[in-house]
Image (cartoon, rainbow, N blue to C red):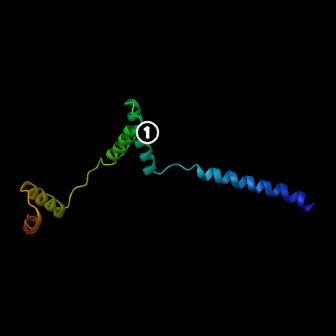
Amino acid sequence: MRLITALPLLAGLLLSTNLMAADTAAKTPSPAQAAQQKRMTDCNQQATTQSLKGSDRTTFMSTCLKAEGHHTEKTLTPQQQKMKDCNADAAKKSLKGDERKTFMSSCLKKTA
């Protein structure tokens, strides 16, 4: 008799647990996830418009998703800017090896 009463109770408990789990699984996405989903949708539409298929589509999607993520470009710190400028100067002068090391060292030591 107890078994007959316990089975429906156990079944009800299992069903209610499954329903609660289904409610928890249907969460709203975070702002970052929503932005990523929008980027995916936009890039996908562009790829479809261009009739891209296979590896061309994969390459386009990769490039598109990376480009979308870099709208706000970081500003360089003064040290990074100095490094960039010295590196460009060394490249213009076609310096290599020890000459480049010496030039970079002296260039980076200079005050801006």
Give the residue drawn at x 43%, y 39%: 41
Along the horizontal axis of the image, is 29 left or right of 60? right
Give the residue drawn at x 15%, y 58%: 84
Q: Quadrant of the N terminus?
A: bottom right
Along the horizontal axis of the image, is 78 left or right of 110? right
Q: Secondary structure at mark 1?
A: helix
**Residue holding disc 1:** 41
Depth order, front residue of 47/36? 47
Give the residue drawn at x 20%, y 58%: 76
The crowding category of the residue bearing disc 1, from other C-alpha atoms within 10 Å (few below 14, some 14 to 19, many at least 20), is few
Give the residue drawn at x 42%, y 47%: 36
Q: Amino acid at mark 1?
A: Thr
Give the x, y percent position of residue 107.
8, 65
Give the x, y percent position of residue 45.
41, 34
Depth order, front residue of 71/104? 104
Depth order, front residue of 84/98? 98
Q: Is residue 43 above or below residue 19?
A: above
